[in-house]
Amino acid sequence: MNAERGRNREQQFIRTRREDEAGVWYALDNAAIIMPAVTNEITTGLFRFEAELDAPIDPEAMKGALDLTVRRMPYFNVSLRRGLFWYYFEPCSTLPPLYPDSPSPCQQWDINRSGTRMFRVRCEQNRIATEFSHAMTDGTGGLSFFKTLLAHYFFLKGIDPGTRLGEGEWSDILVSGSAVQEEFEDAYQRYFPKGLPFPETGLNAFHLDSRPLPGGQYRVISGILSTAQVLAEAKRRNATLTELLVAVYLDALQHIWHETKPHPRTPLVAVEVPINLRALFPSRTFRNFSLFVLISEDMRLGMRSFDELVERTHYQMKLEYDRMSIAKHLSRNAGSARSLGVRLVPLWVKDIFARILFAKFGESMLSGFISNLGPVEMPPGFVLHIHRFGFIPAPSLTTLTNASVVSWGDELLVNFGSLAQSRDIERLFFRRLRSLGLHVSVSCRLEEETHAILP
């Protein structure tokens, strides 16, 4: 009896879909709980996937594809509601509309506004983009939705994928069947480790000192490289592609820190590297299930050579990216939702503490982040119709500038999203890559700024 009661209690935390006399609703997962309190129309918490197709978007076919996608993945078609103790997601009774695109993505979208969905789909000529709130999903979940949307669109345009979808390597493209609980479970709670010590509290990190761009502007600077060339350079240095790029990011930050006079009072430069927990803790969830590794350097010790940064990044990643080390973060982050005392605190009080905790344990600990999603794969019949994939990070008024990475075939696309007028991080980052003998093609969504990025 006690064992059965224990299993039921665990399922209470793991299941996010609930139903009562008011109807169906979804609980926020562990990573999402803090997001409503710390987002607004500028720091929206939106990240973005986009694809350039070989023909202009057919709006009617795309509306049909969106209809099919949200019917198969209904846990995405929700809006945020406030309860007495917790936020929750309420299913939307209508289909989401298509929106025009903008040179400033991921802006002017406040999930706290009544009726606002947790994602939006935008079209512009040949480009289709979907922007997702981190309150709803992470990169893995968002990419699955985006790939499913594209698959439905190609089907409606009469394009054969050339393979069977929904299983094997294409199991993340959901074009048949219906939603099952595992797709929207709180995987943090499924793998919650009891009794582990919490990780040590990190120090505050250096932040770029720059005036922000005017409200509503979010600059995207893109660098295109050869995936094979970057992989070869990383292998030559006994590092992974991600480790190489993190070292390049740290190198840019250390130059900015040392060139700032007087030196900033905060001596630590730190780069956050999000990690997909599904690689360590198997789960089918398309909700959030990621944490991060923090790679840092103390500038009081002086400038490090680039070779040193690559080597040190490699070993820091080895030390931090392991199941037991990650489990400590999982224990701290997932444990609060289980505390009866926390659960009984009114929501308005939770919001206050959420902002305080986010400031202390969130972006104050990092100078910026770089998120590498890795290679994007699509069925062979669709590949010929997709020229390029893109991945754009969520905006932040604390770190101001962050990066995201994705590869499509032999094209490695590094996108910097920035709310800062300064372009120093992007300039130093891409110059370092060029100094390694790598060919980099750089462009900016705000075309008049492109000339100022690289000589």
Image (cartoon, rainbow, N blue to C red):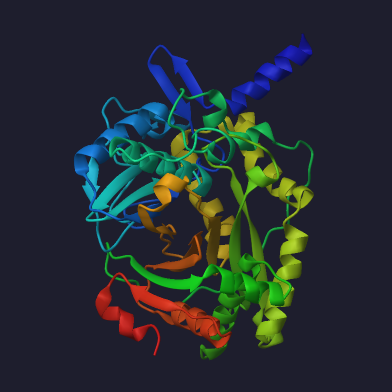
State the residue at coordinates (57%, 39%).
30
Question: Residue most toward the top?
Answer: 1
Q: Is residue 359 visible?
A: yes
Q: Name the foreground residue: 434 vs 182.
A: 434
Is 412 positioned to the left or the right of 419 in the image?
right
Pinpoint residue 53: horizontal percent, then vertical percent. 32, 54
Pinpoint residue 149: horizontal percent, then vertical percent. 37, 40
Pinpoint residue 23: horizontal percent, then vertical percent. 39, 16
The quarter of the displayed image where residue 390 is located = bottom left
Count the marks: 0
Q: Name the foreground residue: 76 vs 51.
A: 51
The quarter of the displayed image where residue 333 is located = top right
State the residue at coordinates (29%, 41%).
113
State the residue at coordinates (69%, 40%).
281
Pinpoint residue 209: horizontal percent, then vertical percent. 45, 78
Q: Name the foreground residue: 371 vs 230.
A: 230
Q: Name the foreground residue: 407 vs 418.
A: 407
Q: Identify the image quadrant of the C terminus.
A: bottom left
Q: Is residue 134 visible?
A: no
Q: Identify the image quadrant of the N terminus.
A: top right
80 to 374, vertically: above or below = above
